[in-house]
Amino acid sequence: MGRPNGFTVLEVLVALLVWAIGLLGLGVEMAALTRQISRARRAALVSATAAARLERLQAAACNGRADGSEAVTQGSVAIAILHWTWSEGPPLTYQVRLVTAPTRVVAGAAGAAGAADTMRAVMACDR
């Protein structure tokens, strides 16, 4: 008598186990991808806000300079703080230093991706 066609219960259980492990791995990768997309969106928002602030500071550099700070928010949550300071350089030249610092909540969630960043610009004024 020959072997019957079909699968044994053990073969079906092993196949289901392999399938479940594959689905679990896919779920973990989807969660990691979602976190990375969220980090990238926050970083893009902070970069765009810092670039816009730097442009406004450059436009007003020859008329008046004041140190300051500004919160970058996503919805109602502050995700970073921009700090800028002015210094004088050679005659009729000013330098602005803009530091983007993530808030504690975002820095803790983002790990190393939540590091502070510094931008510098030098403006020459004619008088």
Image (cartoon, helix red, strand yellow):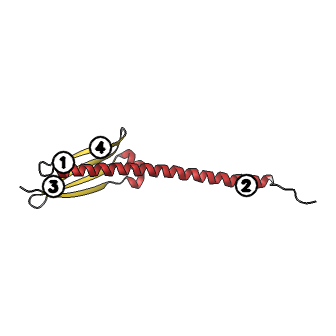
Q: In the rendering, at what x and y percent does residue 106 appear? A: 39, 47
Look at the numbered disc 2 and give the secondary structure of its residue: helix
Q: Is residue 100 left or right of residue 1?
A: left
Amino acid type shown at disc 4: Ala
Q: Is residue 113 left or right of residue 11?
A: left
Residue 87 badge: 3
Q: Give the mark nearest the N terminus, 3 or 1.
A: 1
Q: Which residue is mark 1?
A: 67
Q: Which residue is mark 2?
A: 14
The extreme bottom residue here reads 90
**How many C-alpha atoms fall within 10 Å of the one at disc 2: few (<14), some, or many (≥20)?**
few
Q: Which residue is mark 4?
A: 71
Distance of label 3 from label 2 (alpha carbons): 69 Å
Q: Give the mark nearest the N terminus, 1 or 2.
A: 2
Amino acid type shown at disc 3: Ser
Q: In the rendering, at what x and y percent does residue 10 appear? A: 78, 54
The extreme top residue here reads 76
Question: Going 37% across and 52% down the picture, which residue do you hit?
Answer: 114
Amino acid type shown at disc 1: Asp
Distance of label 3 from label 4 (alpha carbons): 22 Å
Q: In the rendering, at what x and y percent does residue 119 appear? A: 26, 56
Look at the numbered disc 3 and give the secondary structure of its residue: strand
